[in-house]
Image (cartoon, rainbow, N blue to C red):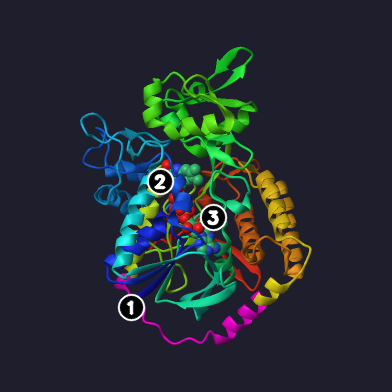
Amino acid sequence: MKEILIIGNGISGMMCAIRCAELGMKVKLIAPGPSEQSQSVMAAGGINAVTERHEEGDSVQCHIEDTLKGGAYLAGSNAVKGLCSDAKEIIHYLERIGTVFSVDEQDRPLLRAFGGQTYKRTHYCGSSTGKHIVSALVMEVRRFEAAGLITRIMRHHFYSALISDGRCYGALLYDEDARELVPVYADALVMATGGQNCLFGKTTGSSRCDGYAVGRLFMQGAALKNLEFIQFHPTTLETPQKRMLISEAVRGEGGRLFYMDGDQKVFFMEDKYGPRGNLMTRDLISREIVATGRDVLLDISFMDKRLIDSRLPEVRDICAKYRGIDISKEPIPVAPSVHYFMGGLAVHKDHETNIQGLYAVGECASIYHGANRLGGNSLLSAMYSGKVAAESISGKDHKLEPADFENYILAEQEGFKKMLDAKSPFAAMHIRDMLADTMREHMSIVRCADSLSKVIEDVRYYLSVAERIQYYASVSAYTNYSLSGILTLALAALTCADARRESRGAHYRSDYPTASDEYRAATIISYNDGNMQVSFDRENAYED
Ligand SMILES: Cc1cc2nc3c(=O)[nH]c(=O)nc-3n(C[C@H](O)[C@H](O)[C@H](O)COP(=O)(O)OP(=O)(O)OC[C@H]3O[C@@H](n4cnc5c(N)ncnc54)[C@H](O)[C@@H]3O)c2cc1C
């Protein structure tokens, strides 16, 4: 029986575990905490699919075209075809396992439009779709746990992969309770570690998604893709702890963006792009908001209060709780913030990376969203990629050849122990905060060569400090050992942003403000002995 190790228990990790178990494989599902604490529970607005109950005129082909166009034609077209074609089955599966989507009085699914969609095709559960999907998947995971096919292991973190001669044999994990590194061998290792929020500090997402695992795997030889494409969500609310998402569902329900010019309301998106202006893609709206140079507001107060209560209860509660705003009476002050990472581990259509036996699914993999993700497509890709990876693993002969990791494991364990015993006054967290400040300032919605070279210099300096200090005073061993992986990932993202001398999707360069055919290709970055190498995948080699 094949044994699979999955790191991360959000929607993509759980879906992969369930499908592996259905196919008769044995799974270890690893994460620091329960699935109910993964970022997936934050997903609000919904999941896209064209089902038999679609809006008139809509089709799977139209979903494919919207996705490719929204991603500025950088997404893998075969992969997107698979994603959109399977979406209907994914909705039915979710219903079967207990996800209750919002319906009208006739029991027909309610659909909403997200930015960049030609038709309404987003299925939702009020404004807490992620929570409902996670609950249903957790029940399924438990069912397979009872059958002895899935084992959930918490309070464990990824440390590194066990790789020899381009083949992955499992991972070294940090066990928080034992405070030691433990090897876990597996026929396939599946990464499902989500986005890279820590690179930017305050974002809409979870601080558990820090990008470390992706950074570390990069240093171990895994190629990364499209790192410069970072989605800024146009409508977020400032709070002391983080940026709270004001879901696109508000605009999907008719919400209007405006700013005040004296006592006049200026509906700048509608003025420039017509009646669908508030539902343009996220990259474009974010840039337009920045271009106004004003404080922008989002108004939904004209909507019937009962509809607000039934369709947007979470948005209503967030605004009331964090800022004392009653959205049925007043507009919401909004600003763009980092929200989603289109880039990550480069995977083939079957979700295997360039390292045999190493797979990536969900937000940490890069394949479906090109230069900009459409709202509602991420939950879909998390579900779909989990399935595809499991089926691919099941179909391949991943027979383990013996590989000797004893020396590697002993050396890492020894270094780790030294780190735990060290008493340095230097805190790793300070470097992470400095990184986040500089990334927010220079790797923002509008970028340029001068600013990028400044931040590249800064991050190189942080890395050199990190290499010299090695051991820090810190709140946790994880914060210590994750630092160099996070800094390396940041440097890789900046290097990609510097190399792409055009503007496309979420990557906007004031010094190269238009798209160029020369760059109509995915960015691939690899790491060799401390050197990073960027190339552009014009043949779409990674998709097939
Ligand atoms: C506020 C918000 C609202 C959103 N709304 C929507 C929406 O309406 N529709 C939509 O399609 N998308 C939405 N998204 C995006 C979507 O929620 C995510 O892209 C998706 O849930 C990611 O799922 P995932 O399984 O890849 O990762 P996650 O759910 O982020 O799970 C990652 C897992 O990896 C674990 N992990 C991370 N690092 C390590 C490590 N080093 N070691 C061990 N474990 C680790 C984490 O603890 C977690 O268990 C939203 C995102 C946010 C932030």
Identify which residue, 389 or 446, lies in the foreground.
Answer: 389
Question: In terms of secondary structure, where does tag 3 sit?
Answer: loop
Q: Nearer the viewer, mark 3 or mark 1?
A: 3
**Picture mark count:** 3
Question: In terms of secondary structure, where does tag 1 sit?
Answer: loop
Q: Amino acid at mark 3?
A: Cys
Among the 4 quarters of the image, the one containing residue 306: top left
* Quadrant in the picture for the N terminus: bottom left
- From the viewer's perspective, is residue 41 above or below residue 157? above
Q: Please provide percent x and percent y for residue 39.
A: 48, 50
- From the viewer's perspective, is residue 184 above or below residue 47? below
Q: Which residue in the protein does label 1 denote?
A: 397
* Quadrant in the picture for the C terminus: bottom left
Q: Please provide percent x and percent y for residue 126.
A: 37, 36
- From the viewer's perspective, is residue 75 above or below residue 358? above
Question: In terms of secondary structure, where does tag 2 sit?
Answer: helix
- Determine whether the beta carbon of the residue marked 2 sits less than 8 angstroms from the nearest atom of ligand 1: yes
Q: Which residue in the protein does label 3 denote?
A: 209
Give yes or no for contact between labels 1 and 2 (Cβ–Cβ under 8 Å).
Answer: no
Q: Amino acid at mark 2?
A: Gly
Q: Which residue in the protein does label 2 denote?
A: 130
- Determine whether the beta carbon of the residue marked 3 sits less than 8 angstroms from the nearest atom of ligand 1: yes
3 or 1: tag closer to the N-terminus: 3
